[in-house]
Image (spheres, rainbow, N blue to C red):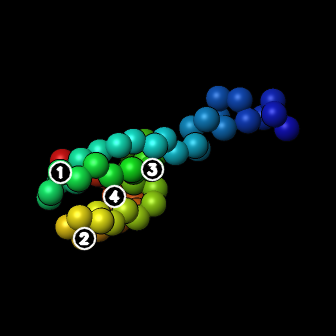
Amino acid sequence: MAILDGCSGKSWTPTVQERPCPTCGEILEVFTKDGVVTEEVTCPKCGLVIEAGKAFPQ
């Protein structure tokens, strides 16, 4: 089945990014796929919730 994973398998894998919280600047670990957050993230410092299925706020 590895042959079938090839390039198309990579497009389904989310990437991990360290992004600053748009409210307080705390560094957050965010999983994204095609610029969209794949897991809900809550800032431990200010409590801002970034919902899955939305673009990371600027």
Q: Residue furthest left?
A: 23
Does residue 57 appear in this view?
Answer: no
The image's mark for residue 36 is none
Q: 53 and 26: which one is in front?
A: 26
Secondary element at image label 3: strand
Q: Position of residue 50 (x, y in %)?
A: 31, 63
Residue 28 placement, left or right of 48: right
- For mark 2, what is the residue? 47
Tell me the amino acid under the disc marked 2.
Gly
Residue 55 placement, left or right of 7: left
Depth check, mark 2 against mark 4: the one in front is 2
Label located before the other in sequence (3 or 1)? 1
Q: Residue furthest right?
A: 1
Q: CA distance from mark 2 to mark 1?
A: 12 Å
Tell me the amino acid under the disc marked 1.
Gly
Tell me the amino acid under the disc marked 3.
Phe
Tell me the amino acid under the disc marked 4.
Lys
- For mark 3, what is the residue? 31
Label located before the other in sequence (3 or 2)? 3
Q: CA distance from mark 2 to mark 4?
A: 17 Å
- For mark 4, what is the residue? 54
Residue 41 placement, left or right of 58: right
Residue 8 higher or lower than 35, as above or below: above
- For mark 1, what is the residue? 25
Secondary element at image label 2: loop
Q: Quadrant of residue 51?
A: bottom left
